[in-house]
Image (spheres, rainbow, N blue to C red):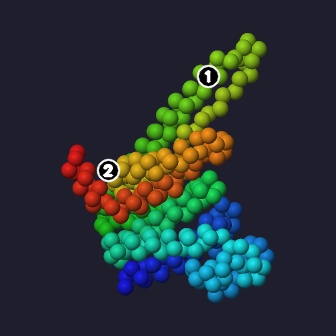
Amino acid sequence: MEMILAFVFGIVFGSFLNVVILRIPNDESIVFISSHCYSCNNKLKPWHNIPIFSWIFLRGKCAYCQANISKQYPIIEFISGILFAVLVQKYSFSVPIIFIYLSFSMLLVLAMIDFKYKMIPDSINLLAIVFAILGAWNMEGFINNFQNALLFAGGFTLLRFSLSYILTSSAHRVANKTLTPWTKHYQRYPYIEAMGEGDIMVAATMGALLGTHLTLVAIFLSAVLALPVMVAVHNKSAEEQRVPFVPFLALATFIVYIFDTPIKSFIEANY
């Protein structure tokens, strides 16, 4: 019964997540603008907003202008419901699990926005970190979550600085080989960012949710999950090669969180 209630709550909250995914990148209010069709601007009725079912009954089309409604809506609602149901099934219903679910929900939003727009809103990132830190069963856990968030934020910041320096220095050396006495005073070198600031904040969320060892496992798993995609776009254009990494970080974090016990057992048995 708990899982059913969790799933229902999850899909309802998933409907709100769709609003966040759609409006935040466009600087629109998620509260004061009523739900409407973006094709004909007609306000939607309450029965047009029933999670998953409205999309099915309307056959994926607007009730007014028959414009196609993105499949993203029922997919995000379903994923949100599954997220909460799986968390409740593993740990039962509790206040910490609500915060943990909210943190994963923010990661879901970040993953979709990164996938669609290749951007990571700081407001959503901060909420994900705060919810992850609050998802503790006691004060000691709260402090540990906060420390782990700081640890991985600092670690990723150092990694970003180091990789950016190496890549930029390499670009400078290549550019210097083409300099002439006529152009050496006019050469401008780009600073190459190896990692975005948004990824650093996501790492902080991962640290708060998983702890030190499991976060390292999740980072490795995210790289493994992203590898086939990176290989597939290797010969594509520069824009197509910009693969959003947050979806892989979020997916790996959830997988490791759910299967934390066997992963910990494996680590303890082998190291």
Of callouts 2 and 1, the N-terminal one: 1
Q: Farthest top residue?
A: 181
Query: What amino acid is labelled 1 in the image?
Result: Val
Q: Quadrant of the N terminus?
A: bottom left
Residue 124, position as x, y percentages in the image: 55, 61
Residue 32, position as x, y percentages in the image: 68, 75
- Residue holding disc 2: 213
Instruction: Examine the image and state in which quarter residue 239 appears.
Output: top right
Residue at (70% x, 82% y) in the render: 44
Residue 229, position as x, y percentages in the image: 54, 49
Residue at (49% x, 54% y) in the render: 248
Is disc 2 placed on a helix, strand or loop?
helix
Q: Residues within 10 Å of mark 1 (few under 14, many from 20)?
A: few
Residue 174, position as x, y percentages in the image: 61, 22
Q: Answer left or right for 180 relative to 113.
A: right
Please name whichever residue, 218 or 227, is drawn nearer the observer in this view of the structure: 227
Can residue 6 be seen by looking at this rendering? Answer: yes
Is disc 1 placed on a helix, strand or loop?
helix
Contact (Cβ within 8 Å) of mark 2 with mark 1: no
Residue at (55% x, 63% y) in the render: 109
- Residue holding disc 1: 174
Please name whichever residue, 58 or 177, is drawn nearer the observer in this view of the structure: 58
**As drawn, 231 above or below 36:** above
Q: Residues within 10 Å of mark 2 (few under 14, many from 20)?
A: few
Please name whichever residue, 21 or 255, is drawn nearer the observer in this view of the structure: 255
Q: Quadrant of the C terminus?
A: top left
Query: What amino acid is labelled 2 in the image?
Result: His
